[in-house]
Image (tube, coloured by chain):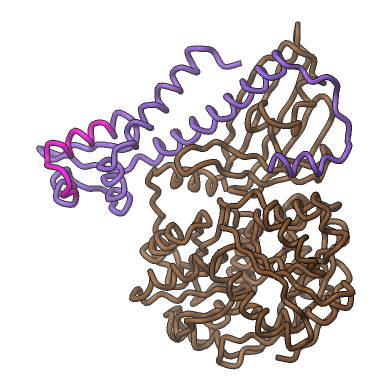
Amino acid sequence: MGTVAVSAEEFAAVPPEVVFDRFGGGTGAGWLFDAACDRIAVGAVVTLRVPLGGAGPVDVLGRISALRRPTSLTVSHDQPWRGRIRLRFTPAPGGTRIRLHAEIDERGLEWLMRRQGLPVRPGAAAGPRIGLLTSKSGPGSLFAAATENVATLALEEINGDGGVAGRPVELLVADDATDPATGAVEALRLVRSGCSTVFTMTTSATYDAVSAALGDSGALVVQSHMNEGGGESRLRIRLGERPARQLAAAATPLMRAAGGRRWFLAGNDYVWPREVNAAARAVLPAVGAELVGERYAPLGTEDFAPIVETIAASGADVVLNSFVGADSAAFERQCHAMGLRDRALSLGPALDEVTLERVGAPAATGIHGVSGYFQQLDTEGNGTLLQRYRATFGPWAPPLSTLTESVFEAIHMWAAAARRARTTDPGPVADAMRVGRYEFPRGTVTLDGTDLVQQQLYLAEARGTSFAALCPADVAG
Amino acid sequence: MSSDSDTSGRAERRDLAFDALADPVRREILAVLAEEDECSAGALAERITSVGRTAVSTHLRVLRVAGLVTERRAGRFRYYAVDPTGSAAEVMTLLQGLFQQSLHDVRATVENRPPASGRTDTDRTDGAAEAG
């Protein structure tokens, strides 16, 4: 894939050290130097809020990949495209020459063109096309960060294995901008561009909008990751963990660890968090839990202080966090900053490895996750996947999680189904996908014709900025 | 460092493309062209029903000057197509402008209000949380 470069240069009448130390140092020094990061160190995660105009700023998510104070600093980023921004500071008479070198690949250019309203035409199809609708901007770009990478890996494996019907499968990617209406428009575009199946790695709110918008298109829509279920039909497949089972598996061990039974339910205001909490009201009291409060905030919220205060006042022992993406990270950081960590544990069914990195190690203590996959999972398939992932995308690519790894699995399921059905027609492919037993990185996954995936769930606890202490959780239910 | 004329040339081109995209009819024309390989002026005018033929021609001229569409003449017909290099150049110019502005901002900050001391590798969790 071709990469193009953009350069910029400036002079400042202060020594290199002074310029260098402005990076990540707070507001007022331009969007690039206003980087949000906890540490200036190699590997530290960084968010750059780019004033792209139009629909508002866009977060560039990456990490510091090289550093030499006061000479150079490199940010490698994955959202909204994969690239690097290199900064060099050289002494010049009377000050410092600042040089910037940034890379953008074809997919990045295409994303930028679409966002600016510029037309982009897909080339002629060389084989079957599948669509991936994911979040490359908005709060969901955090949990979706590894999606395109794992989809690309799955495609490489499928095409390395002869493709489907003797032809290479092509992946088209679209960005819902964490907005259901945008997602619906982009999903229609994918279908018009020849994708007979669309995989969604977005919020369930976008899934619902896409499912409705593609109502009479004849396309198959697959939501591979955890969701609340509902609306399944022949051409609507919803895999992934369901809240009732996750909660049933996690509730008792969490209350034992917390030494208390009072739960507070808090999440973003859309269908998945609402259904997680509906499941909580159904599941938790039966195992002896007491529900002491419930609050919602719209996606894109940055100030959670009122909710955290309410939680603190409720005397909760466990917080069920169903915020997602950037909201979830901000919520947990503010819980920590406001002293809630000393009093309550947190269970985040969708708080994945990427989000945990943004929560940061100090605020991560006490956070628990429950799902069918964690990056630390010790299976042979996961070892192979991680090895290939790192070999292809390097050490700075975002960690995998149950959300993104499910996309890898679902695309493989689709290819296996298309080969079995000897067609890429959505109906027969969907029928073939619904029945089977698969060996995946997360372990054995069984489908019995319904959309309820049988898989082992694990309860995990944050250690630093990754999940560890994986414990198989009860499979019942 | 970019020369002044270079910078202003880029800025001018960017402004042209921004102006070109600001109009809903021109965005509609681009959307139609994005779906077709090439489209005659007449066929375009039939697809764009919100304004008349003359207005469509005017909009096409703006898009052509901004480098967003190409024009091909065959006899008395004119055919239009999306200029992919124009779009790519446009977003590269946009990116360059954003980076340049950011470096300009850091210059303004360090020259006017230099920080009291160099920061070390200490943890800044709380400060970053405030910054959001």
At which x and y percent is residue A251?
Answer: 78, 80
Above or below, comparing residue B86 to residue A236 in the picture: above
Residue A375 visible in the shown view: no
The residue sitting at 54% across, 41% down in the picture is A57
Reply yes or no: does residue A65 show up in magenta.
no
Question: What stretch of residues is rendered in magenta?
Answer: B48-62
> Which one is in front, A346 or A45?
A346
Chain in brown (letter)? A
Write down the quadrant of residue A33 in the picture.
Answer: top right
At which x and y percent is residue A280?
Answer: 68, 79
User: Residue pushed farthest front?
Assistant: A313
The residue sitting at 54% across, 70% down in the picture is A271
Using residue A137 as the reference point, say whether residue A245 is left or right of it: right
Above or below, comparing residue A278 to residue B79 in the picture: below
Reply yes or no: does residue B61 show up in magenta.
yes
Q: Colour of chain B?
A: purple
Main SS of residues in magenta? helix
The residue sitting at 52% across, 80% down in the picture is A237
Residue A83 visible in the shown view: yes
Using residue A347 as the reference point, say whether residue A2 is left or right of it: left
At which x and y percent is residue A162?
Answer: 57, 73
